[in-house]
Amino acid sequence: MLKKVFIGKAFLLGDHVNTDILHPPDYFSLKKDTIASGLSKGAEDFIARMGRDDIIVAGRNFGCGSSRESSARSFAYNGIAVIVAESFARIFYRNLTNQGIYLITCPGISKKAVPREPLVIDLEKNEIRSQDRDWAIPCDPLTRYVQRVLGKGGLLKFLEEQLR
Amino acid sequence: MKSRNTYSHTILLQHCVDTEAPSAGEYGKFSVDFILGHDPTTALLVDDFNRLGGKIWDRDRVLFTADHFAPPASEDRAGILKKFLDFCRKEGIKNLELFSGICHQLLVEHPAVIPGKLVIGADSHTVTAGALGCFATGMGSTDVLYGLITGSVWLKLPECFKITFTGQPAPYILGKDIILKLLAELGEDGALYRSLEFIDATKQGVSMDSRFSISNMVVEGGAKAGIFLPDKITHAYLKEKGAEAGGTIALPEQSVYEREMALDVSSIEPQVAIPPHPSHAVTVTDVAGEHIDQVYIGSCTGGRLEDLGIAAQLLKGKKTAPYCRVIVIPSSNKIYLKAIEKGYIQTLIEAGAAIANPSCGPCGKIDKGIIAEGETCLATSNRNFDGRMGGKGSRVFLCSTATAAASALEGTIADPRKYF
């Protein structure tokens, strides 16, 4: 089932955060625990500062760099279900979508949201709004294909059904 | 969508398997011609592949390479390599390249990789093969798993840029300088999701080795593909490598691009990308004299025959600077053997370089040549993110092999022009 609403507090990150920062190559492993523990270890460990109901609101070109899927899996293994950004790097977008994580492209969001601001991501109206202040801005709708993958819970489940 | 009738769209639409061609910005399903995988990213898909009871759609259209952990230097990496090799054995993969070079070089050397093909690979630098006129793009392991089983992939029909190279590069200017200059103009995400189409209108033509570096690094501007429209130089290369028949594709007429640019390569000066991004390129004179601890000549953008030839030309009969480590890694065994035959390797060893076997080397902090906290490496590789090659606060500057070789002589970043 496709989720329609996410609620959480804005956790702001900058532009061009690359996958070596999000998940350094030393944490590339086939072991789930090692992959999970590498998230955000490439710079200051921002995951350690994130609250349970926080939602990452990144700047432009989030996840640029290497295609190592270990970085995408580390988000999934840490229970992250949705990320908002001004824009996403292409392979990173695919990799996280394939893990069943909702990536919401929302141009202008990093100038609107302030740290810890409670947000509503409304995928019925395709907008993101503040719960505290009076603003709402449109986000890009998820394409039909991405909706199908996310509706199944990721590309593997999608493929599993196709092979049945 | 602005782009219409482009070379990229022509290739993609020939491969579209949907009853209705995808519309602007939508995804479509495309059949793939060839798939590339290497040891770590392929090992990552093995468990899911086996759990699904998968079967590879066409074993002959797959190239698997062991190049990252080649050979492995730790027990953990030996385990990853074993998983990869067990998988190859079980699936009866014939196109297995074991420690014979970097996947992106081995891909372009493969006879099945010819113009007009749709190629995907489990590595972001798969775009390298665009230099041969293919639509080649990188993805993660799960997308590649999907491709291996179904022979298809979901893609968005991209916007396209047309980039025409004019003039004639100076002898000390390589493809690396051209792409660094272009990335600086485009910016870190200036080509996000775009397919870049290169038209080589230079007087003598940009060499194939330089084209591979150019296509390789389009991903550093966010691009999905970087394609050289096939010309005489492409066809000469295809003939030389003994390419399969086919590969002639009618160049589309009346193409419409989102953006058109021209770059006069005559005026390009040697470029150096300062950390932490490949698009942060400046002219070498802006950083000349910067102390370096190591020079790395190699990777999928600096270890080809043209590179080794230039390095040997500059280092012949000279010695590398004291205390400056110089590591040279040919991009494939084919290149390595040719470089031995031409005497380049002997020249480089005599000058003080350490030669390692064809593999990814220290790029991505993978193998031999990792630098310590606070150290600086000048490299011909393609990424200079923080800590890309070593410890905290270590830095990587990117440049051409000409600049790297000149700098190896001086122990600081040096302008190669005085050696030409």
Image: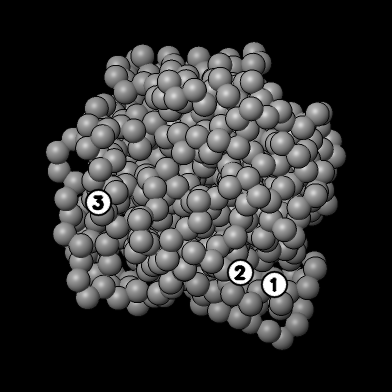
The residue where tag 3 is placed is B232
Going from N to C along the chain, the mark reached first, 1 or 2, is 2
Q: Residue at x 26, y 73 (%)?
A: B255
* Mark 2 and mark 3 residues within 8 Å of each other at the beta carbon: no
Q: Relative to residue B278, is residue B328 depicted above or below?
A: above
Distance from disc 1 to disc 3, alpha carbons, whole Å, reads 48 Å
* Mark 1 and mark 2 residues within 8 Å of each other at the beta carbon: yes
Q: Residue at x 22, y 37 (%)?
A: B239
Q: Secondary structure at mark 2?
A: loop
Q: Secondary structure at mark 3?
A: helix
Residue B385 drawn at (x, y percent): 69, 48
* Mark 1 and mark 3 residues within 8 Å of each other at the beta carbon: no
Q: Which amino acid type corresponds to the residue marked 1 in the rendered image? A: Ser
Q: Is residue B295 left or right of residue A141?
A: right
Q: Which amino acid type corresponds to the residue marked 2 in the rendered image? A: Glu
Residue A141 drawn at (x, y percent): 47, 71
Q: Secondary structure at mark 1?
A: helix
Q: Which amino acid type corresponds to the residue marked 3 in the rendered image? A: Lys
Residue that extends furthest to the bottom in the rendered view of this protein: A134
Which numbered marker is on residue A86?
2
Q: Quadrant of residue A130?
A: bottom right
Distance from disc 1 to disc 2, alpha carbons, whole Å, reads 7 Å
Depth order, front residue of B116/A51: B116
Residue A65 drawn at (x, y percent): 58, 49
